[in-house]
Amino acid sequence: MKRITLLAGFLLCLTGLAKAQPGRFEQPIFDEVACTEAIPFSSATAQGASSPSTLYLDFYEPVGDTMARRPLVITVFGGAFVTGSRDFSDMKEYCNRLSTYGYVAASIDYRLLPLTGLSATGLVRTAYMASQDVSSAVRFFKAHGEEYRIDTASIFLLGNSAGSIAILHEVFVDEDERPAETYSNPDLGGMHESGYVEYLGYSPKVAGIIPQWGGVLDLDFIDDDETTPVCLIHGTEDNTVPYDSGYCYGGWLPSLMPYMYGSHSIAERLAEVQHPDFELHPFEGEEHAFYFTSNYQLDMPKFDSCFSIVRNFLLRHLDNGVIGMEEHVEPLLSVHPNPVTDMLHVSGATEEGSFVVIDLSGRCWHTFKTTASHDLSFDVSRLPQGVYLLLYRKKSGTSAVKFEKY
């Protein structure tokens, strides 16, 4: 099996390396892994559903580990957005094996599309929902970093097929780049606004992504200001999600299947915008999800090849100072007075966007458009007494601040 590696720079952080046992992250040093199953991390409404459902994750960690802040890999299963689960064999193998190397890992749920609702619009909306659910998982772990002993600056995403599409869009789609299908029936909201409202104020940024045989709907999602490290793995004869570009599933039912840009096109776009840190690993002659056999068992030699790429990508970024580094957090909004009776004064708006006031059930009460200004005021006198979140939606993402109305 021939593998060509294209490297484009490295992360240049040189501070804050965490202390770890010799050989940790390079080789397996733990013999036993514990898995805590069915941890709720989000609640969201799927395409075609009338009410939200709870999403769960399984959390894997090495038994006997004493490291205080550990890097985390979140895995996202495949299944064309209509099937699959967090206990798929490849996700479990990745989580278990990474844990023996000293990482902690999680395999997550995301919303799926019922076959009865299968349509081109439904697929695009569900893919976007899956990306929102990935963001919810990242923000859940940012909020619970101490509880799970996670270095929140060292969270990585790894996907398979649909899961890879989800992580690519979670990282690259800005608020002003949302697909048109996401704005109606109903509006799905911002990429990083789904899930439990108490996690809205946490950053969705990650230390790197590993999309296996994935793609994006539009190469223009990838801008020259995006720097998240990317490790692309793809079979060159993939007919399900094309290695280069084309309709999924070889053009079968093109009116239903989306047109995708696969790993080769993504790598070319990353090179075009001078992305500082990406690599492409084409597997010559291999098809989609090639580490599975025809009866959907893992072909271990092929899985080992992919795992080796994943291990090296993770290790290189830990060695370059990601682990233990304090996460960069953009300046947060501030509001006063808090509690408030009538006029709420807001500081920290640095670019054009909009403000949305929601209560803790997620109900929207007000929306305000704004140009960039550091000092704004809103009349909230008609709000019922209670606790609210003020969301600041802008091109670079969403910020949130809590306030109380009395």
Image: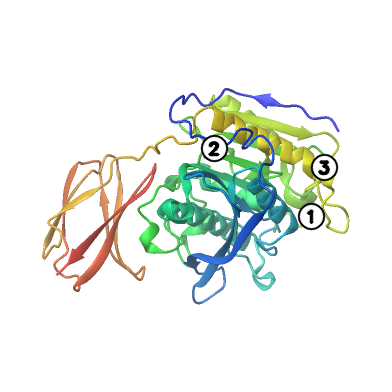
Query: Can you give x and y, in whole percent of width and height, for residue 39 in the image?
Result: 53, 65
Q: Earlier in the sequence, mark 3 or mark 2?
A: 2
Around disc 1, counting alpha carbons within 10 Å, would you say few (fewer than 14), some (14 to 19), or many (20 or more)? few
Q: Can I make out residue 244 in this image?
A: no
Residue underneath mark 3 = 302
Residue underneath mark 1 = 252
Query: Can you give x and y, in whole percent of width and height, for residue 388 in the image?
Result: 26, 64
Pick the front one: 190 or 30: 30
Pick the front one: 7 or 369: 7
Foreground label between 3 and 2 = 3
Q: Can I make out residue 293 in this image?
A: yes
- Above or below — where is 237 with respect to 34? above
Q: Would you say the residues marked 3 and 2 are in contact, meaning their CB atoms lie under 8 Å apart?
A: no
Disc 2 residue type?
Asp
- Above or below — where is 122 with respect to 308? below
Disc 1 residue type?
Trp
Report the side of 189 relative to 243 (left or right).
Answer: left
Say which quadrant the C terminus sits in.
bottom left
Q: Quadrant of residue 350?
A: top left
Residue underneath mark 2 = 220
Report the side of 61 relative to 139 (left or right).
Answer: right
Cα separation, mark 2 vs mark 1, equals: 25 Å
